Image (cartoon, grey):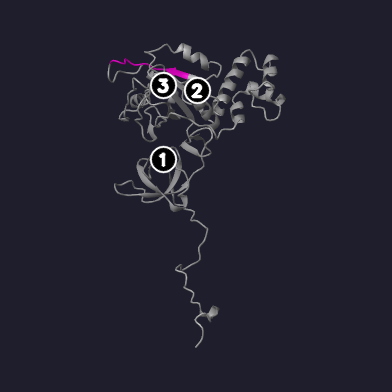
Amino acid sequence: MGSRLDYDESSIRVRPSPRSRPRTKDRPAHKDAVVGMVIGVDRGRWTCLLDDHTVSGMRARELRRTSIVVGDRVALVGDTSGRDGTLARIVRVEDRDTLLRRTADDTDPVERVLVANADQLAIVTALADPEPRPRMIDRCLVAAYDAGMDPLLVLTKADLADPEPFLTQYVSLGVRHVITSTDGDVAGAPIEGLHRVHELLADRMTVLVGHSGVGKSTLVNALVAGASRAIGHVNAVTGRGRHTSSSAIALPLPSGGWVVDTPGVRSFGLAHVDADSIIHHFPELEDGTKDCPRGCSHDEAECGLDAWVEGGHAGPSGRSRLESLRRLLRSRAGDTDDHDS
């Protein structure tokens, strides 16, 4: 009788593979897919706008690691009728023109994609109740420049404070602005300056960002009839607002274009932003960096930009423009005690 360990390879039974055909990396082209725009995201479902109706879609398996955000143009297959209970499949994300991103803080390497394909970033800030936070605004400006978006300052609650002292900080940056006000004692009172806001947002895709309590949802409800965005209030002790928008949503403007309302933010990390991308938005200073030492932060004693400005190469506003550049660079580098103060 042989040993129980006395066997060779022929004694091993090989189970057949359950697959009937070899696996392939080739993916279907989905040439029959229809393209729509993502206008809302909720718990693993994407609301997409086609030509004349909306479709609820889910992410295809091959896109399970692909970020899909409001503003994305996506290709859909399956049932795209939009009828109740139907669900299409998102199989492709089209190339993006712009991408608004942020990180949790300035050391976090993980980017959070906020909105795709927008061309304008409206930074909403109250002039009082709560107090404006210039460092947070500077960070949003850096994010807009990095994304290739035009920044716009939307100042609310001008009935509570004079906007001119605040605006002097942004004159040299050349950032457009619009001022709005309401009668704080009257619920649902009309917003003064709303017509100008409509003009600046018409025919564009504009992202609204801002702290909770600055009046962002109030503004959206005034711009888009039936938007029904929840409105929060400012805590009298902390000076902070309560988050009322829980997810980004794109809403069509009656005058043409789109406005994207985003959840209130309390920090805007810029770990993903290259300093050179900021300098590109200061063309009168950019050529002066050729005289900077290697690895110059443009905010140090050896920086060549000081001599460039003193030589008159940056024009009469060169000094104030240099200070604005350095303020943005410091904001990007996190050289503040509080990101949102």
Q: Earlier in the sequence, mark 1 or mark 3?
A: 1
User: Which of these two is toward me, 26 or 216?
Assistant: 216
User: Which of these two is toward me, 340 or 102?
Assistant: 340
| Residue 133 vertical placement versus 271 (above, below) | above
Horizontal relation, residue 254 to residue 167: left or right: left
For the residue marked with disc 1, what is the amino acid?
Answer: Val
Magenta-colored span: 177-185
How far apart are the two marked residues, 1 and 2, measured between alpha carbons? 31 Å
Tell me the crowding category of disc 1: few under 14, some 14 to 19, or many 20 or more residues within 10 angstroms, Cα based. many
Q: Which residue is mark 1?
A: 38
Name the residue at the left extreme: 187
Verify whether residue 68 appears in magenta.
no
Picture coordinates of residue 40, whole percent (x, y): 38, 39
Q: Is mark 1 in CB contact (under 8 Å) with mark 3?
A: no
Horizontal relation, residue 29 to residue 229: left or right: right
Verify whether residue 179 appears in magenta.
yes
